[in-house]
Image (cartoon, rainbow, N blue to C red):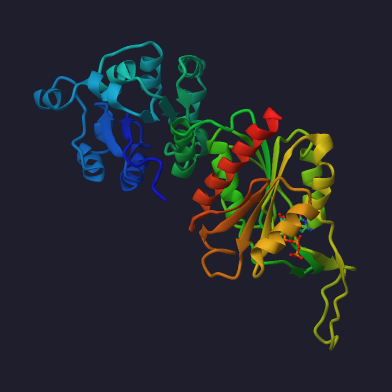
Amino acid sequence: MQSPFAGKNIVIGVTGSIAAFKVASWVSALTQEGADVSVVMTESACRFVTPLTFAALSGRSVLSDMFTAEEARSISHVQLGAEADLLLIAPATANTIARIAYGLADDLLTTTVLAADAPVFVAPAMNSRMLMNPATQRNVEILRDLGHGIIEPDSGMMACKTEGPGRLPEWEDVREQILAALSIQDLKGEKILITAGPTREALDPARFLSNRSSGKMGYALARMAKRRGAEVVLVSGPCSLKPPYGVELIHVQTAYEMCQAVMDSCHDSSVIIKSAAVADFRPVTVASEKVKKEDAEFVLKLEQTIDILKELGERKEENGYLLVGFAAESCHLHASGEEKMKKKNLDLIAINDISGESTGYEVDTNQVILLDQHGFSNLPFTSKEETADLILNRVNQLLSEKRMQ
Ligand code: CTP
């Protein structure tokens, strides 16, 4: 899948904070994803990191002074701002934030911001006391009022050996925030509830029954839905993935807990996507002490867990949500998918062939067959992220059809 940054003109404004070195890896990541990155540095930024570093990583000369003859020949500040698809000021010092807030245009960076005709994001990074100072807070508010995006700083140990807010966040989270500004917000206004990962059913304090689900498909759906503007609640079984940026995450362990969490959130959801691999059985009794292996034989008596999706299907009409299920199948894909769709009263089902090495559990790729009222359609073999995007396209189409009825 091609990166959504490919071919985009991104201007990164680096200002004089110790965190400037972190942005070098952001420039590298963006360039590797195919973006055309132009770096503009303030004079004080050049004291923290040399322009050569950013030039080497972006493959372009760094712009730092609007009055040098060479830079004036290559590109003007007006052109830089006007041609950009997005501007990201990171790290942004209190001084630069104040200058942008008051519309000053006393260097190339501030002039470029004034001339910009694209989304501007500002990532404050500074000592906590400077950040929390009412003057800085007021200036940040002015930036928000001007329509600029604020990348909220993280809290933690600062370079000045104090703890508090003011650190630059991780690139992965910043990437999501700026990607949303470059993506169509076609799911804005939708509340999407997604389940992901496996569940664990305890046998005793040390052991449980579970399955191979990694949660990757559900997390990709949550990330892409959020990127496209939806409000997303992700109910997740135990998995090791980083929570997608801006998504409300509810951790659960068992099928019972997942059911409780889903039933609590289902009423105000416009779409529910159940991609979790819920355990179908659980032990009838859970041993309170660890079962010893001296007990020569260990016979497990299992009972069925509640079918959460089926329950949701029964409540669909009264709640009005669009219901999407998954089917994990190793044979008779079409017939089994169709049967589950009917049995659970779904609007859409994504039938997943789990017998393939690169289309089932744990891997980053997938290939699913979609079934809805219009019939079957095959999605291409691709990344789970693109599969998620294609499923959401179909969800969006079904939502419009439903609202036209
Ligand atoms: N599902 C659920 N609750 C369960 C079992 C499954 O909500 N106790 C949901 C899954 O999240 C998925 C769909 O039902 O969206 C189909 O799950 P799958 O494991 O493919 O099928 P099952 O209904 O469990 O049937 P079987 O295991 O017999 O194929």
Q: Position of residue 316 (x, y in %)?
A: 80, 41
Give above or below for 79 relative to 199: above
- In this rendering, position of residue 315 left or right of residue 147: right
Q: Residue at x 35, y 29 (%)?
A: 85
Label total for image: 0
Residue at image coords 20%, 38%? 60
Residue 139 at x, y percent in the picture: 46, 16
Snapshot quadrant of residue 317: top right
Is residue 119 shown above or below 210? above
- Residue situated in front as seen by the camera: 301 or 108: 301
* Frontmost residue, 125 versus 297: 297
Vertical position of residue 369 compared to residue 245: above or below:
below
Extreme residue toward the left, this view? 69
- Name the residue rendered at 69%, 67% in the picture: 211
Left or right of 179: which side holds 240?
right
Q: Is residue 137 left or right of residue 115?
A: right
Most distant residue in the front direction: 374
**What x and y, as percent, mark residue 5?**
37, 40
Residue 204 shows in the view: no
Taking the view exactly as shown, the residue that stands out farthest to the right is 285
Residue found 48% across the figure and 19% down from its top: 140
Side of 133 relative to 238 (left or right): left
Toward the viewer: 209 or 141? 209
Nearer to me, 134 or 350: 350
Q: Position of residue 103 (x, y in %)?
A: 36, 11
Residue 245 quadrant: top right
218 lies above or below 88: below
Q: Is residue 333 visible?
A: yes
**Quarter of the image where the C terminus is located:** top right
- Image quadrant of ligand 1 equals bottom right
